[in-house]
Image (tube, coloured by chain):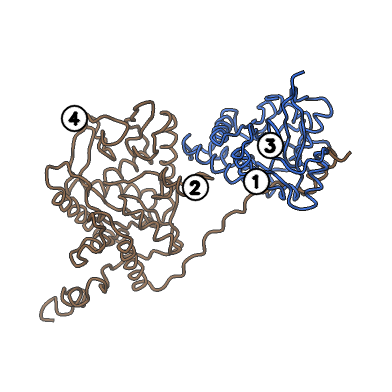
């Protein structure tokens, strides 16, 4: 060997791996560290792009773990309105590593947070839009949060794979308590913006990494076998409070999140990074997976991401047979020969 | 003498308890001329709302409704009566209560009032009798009141056996009045949104979370393993809340 590049495979060189292939024939974008089997319980959480991954896995017969199922007789559309079946638990979007850490600490270590009340309705600052019109009371909010925290505990404890999509670095925090809000107070119902209390924070690399590592460590304590698949949301910021143009602010955020994901996943065989971000955003794809607003990801983009996911899993680990859908318990029927008894009742009463 | 309002008790085999209660003088429907109309079991399932009237579609069912009515009434049209009492009518609220009491009693689950209202509305939409009542109402019926024929009677069949309520939802025996009140409230709001009324099961008849006191079981309930049908006294107690 005269130099280290001589024996590298084709995917290491731009000309053979990218230029000669073209965007839609790219291969080996991902070298998965662990197999994701259909029977594995797969949890999805994080920024909004994670919900696409969960849905695509379920459609392929994989066991997407719904740890907080919708209550009975809630129509599918209503269930989505109330934010069931979006992620594995009813947290709503978890945009940042700090938010994930907050949720996990509340779930496994307990604690309280501020709660919002406006116009007689109650709002959870961890997920202020989880109920379309807010909660009817403080107790209702706390009961709902307790249910979600229990679901999160169950998900972390029982899951085989935890897919987490990193979304933002920009956030708003309570300057007195350090509590990080899911959304900027004042932009949603529940709380008025208070410039003296609500402070903007654009999280840097070290803090992002520390929060993410702390969150993953906390999960590992609960489930030492848990494998984590990190992704970065390709969806640009809807707005930036950084003072920068939203386009450059997006680049800043995504670059940091991508770097943190790479850094953290590089340190453990149980943590992997899946490049859905690159598949959607890289110039090679010429923005073809974005809707005309250049923000929303079109279905073909999600399909392409998932095609790479399954193709690379098969390449490295071989074909898998999707597990049969778990059998649902048959609906309960009243005991006894009801029809026979019914007719006797009628004859006794009316045949005279 | 002022003319009486007209009322019909429509339903499945559970209307037998009402008939007995009426015949035995346990209740009078004071101020109403009363008729009964309905059928049991498979024949009840042959009653449909069609061309502006409730009617039995097959000969056996037609024969039964005529027997039940005793006045030769083959159809129930929206303007035939001032009040339609939909009694029993396979509402099966025990399914809703068992699933939701179980949820409310589970410390790791919760549902908001708003989501519960949506679920109650959907549960009703899945009841054939409710859809028939909506059509009857839309065609001009003045008042329609649903009457739930009651939770299964306690102590008649082993509810912990396969298919029993406690087999799937053992927690429900811990349900308290406030739990039931939440669910009745959601169901009442859902009925009201459809322009329909609901008479809920009286609290004093409920035991063991969501069962009916055995004293209200139909005669020979144990012998027939019939936890569903109730005694005339139960029907009287239920209907005296409104009539």
Q: Colour of chain A?
A: brown
Q: Which mark, residue B86?
A: 3
Residue A128, quarter of picture: top left
**Label 3, label 1: how far apart the Cα atoms are:** 30 Å
Residue annotated with mark 2? A75
Q: Quadrant of the C terminus of chain A?
A: top right
Please give the letter of the chain rendered in blue. Answer: B
Report which residue position mark 1 lands on: B167
- Disc 1 sits on a residue from what chain? B
Are the residues at dot 3 and dot 1 in contact (C-beta closer than 8 Å)?
Answer: no
Give the spatial CA distance, label 4 vs label 2.
41 Å
Is B60 displayed left or right of A131 in the figure? right
Could you say which is closer to the camera, residue B185 or residue B157?
A: B185
* Figure disc tally: 4
The residue carrying mark 4 is: A195
Q: Nearer the viewer, mark 2 or mark 1?
A: 2
Q: For mark 3, does the 10 Å Cα neighbourhood hold few (<14), some (14 to 19), or many (20 or more) residues?
A: many
Which of the chains bears the disc numbered 4? A
The answer to whether the residues at label 4 and label 1 have Cβ atoms under 8 Å apart is no
């Amino acid at each position: 060997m005269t130099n280290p590049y001589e024996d590298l495979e084709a995917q290491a060189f731009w000309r053979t791996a990218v230029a000669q292939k073209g965007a839609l024939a790219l291969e080996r974008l991902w070298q998965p560290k662990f197999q994701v089997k259909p029977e594995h319980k797969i949890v999805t959480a994080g920024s909004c792009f994670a919900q696409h991954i969960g849905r695509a896995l379920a459609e392929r017969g994989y066991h997407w773990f719904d740890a907080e199922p919708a209550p009975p007789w809630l129509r599918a559309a209503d269930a989505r309105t109330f934010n069931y079946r979006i992620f594995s638990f009813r947290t709503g979007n978890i945009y940042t590593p700090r938010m994930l850490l907050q949720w996990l600490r509340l779930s496994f270590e307990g604690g309280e947070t501020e709660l919002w009340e406006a116009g007689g309705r109650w709002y959870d600052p961890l997920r202020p839009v989880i109920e379309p019109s807010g909660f009817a009371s403080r107790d209702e909010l706390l009961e709902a949060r307790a249910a979600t925290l229990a679901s999160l505990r169950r998900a972390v404890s029982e899951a085989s794979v935890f897919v987490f999509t990193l979304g933002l670095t920009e956030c708003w925090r309570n300057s007195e308590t350090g509590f990080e809000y899911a959304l900027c107070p004042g932009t949603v119902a529940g709380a008025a913006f208070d410039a003296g209390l609500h402070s903007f924070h654009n999280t840097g690399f070290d803090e992002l990494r520390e929060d993410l590592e702390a969150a993953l460590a906390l999960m590992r304590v609960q489930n030492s076998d848990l494998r984590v698949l990190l992704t970065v949301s390709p969806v640009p910021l809807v707005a930036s409070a950084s003072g920068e143009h939203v386009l450059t602010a997006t680049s800043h955020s995504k670059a940091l999140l991508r770097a943190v994901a790479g850094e953290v996943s590089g340190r453990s065989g149980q943590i992997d990074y899946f490049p859905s971000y690159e598949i959607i955003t890289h110039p090679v794809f010429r923005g073809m997976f974005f809707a005309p607003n250049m923000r929303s990801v079109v279905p073909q983009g999600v399909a392409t991401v998932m095609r790479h996911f399954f193709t690379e899993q098969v390449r490295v680990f071989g074909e898998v047979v999707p597990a049969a859908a778990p059998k649902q318990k048959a609906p309960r029927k009243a005991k006894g020969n009801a029809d026979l008894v019914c007719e006797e009742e009628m004859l006794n009463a009316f045949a005279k | 003498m002022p003319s009486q309002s007209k009322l019909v008790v429509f339903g499945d085999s559970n209307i037998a308890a009402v008939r007995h209660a009426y015949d035995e003088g346990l209740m009078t429907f004071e101020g109403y001329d009363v008729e009964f109309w309905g059928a049991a079991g498979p024949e009840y399932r042959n009653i449909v709302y069609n061309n502006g009237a409730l009617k039995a579609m097959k000969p056996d069912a037609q024969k039964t409704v005529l027997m039940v009515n005793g006045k030769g009434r083959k159809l129930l049209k929206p303007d035939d009566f001032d009040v339609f009492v939909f009694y029993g009518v396979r509402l099966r609220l025990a399914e809703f209560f068992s699933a939701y009491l179980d949820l409310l009693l589970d410390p790791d689950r919760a549902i908001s009032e708003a989501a519960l209202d949506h679920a109650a509305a959907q549960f009703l939409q899945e009841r054939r009798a409710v859809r028939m009542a909506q059509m009857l109402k839309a065609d001009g019926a003045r008042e329609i009141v649903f009457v739930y024929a009651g939770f299964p009677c306690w102590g008649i069949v082993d509810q912990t056996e396969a298919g029993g309520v406690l087999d799937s939802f053992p927690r429900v025996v811990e349900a308290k009045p406030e739990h039931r009140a939440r669910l009745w409230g959601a169901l009442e709001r859902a009925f009201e949104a459809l322009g329909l009324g609901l008479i809920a099961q009286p609290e004093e008849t409920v035991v063991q979370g969501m069962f009916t006191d055995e004293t209200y079981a139909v005669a020979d309930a144990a012998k027939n393993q019939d936890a569903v049908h109730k005694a005339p006294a139960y029907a009287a107690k239920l209907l005296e809340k409104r009539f």
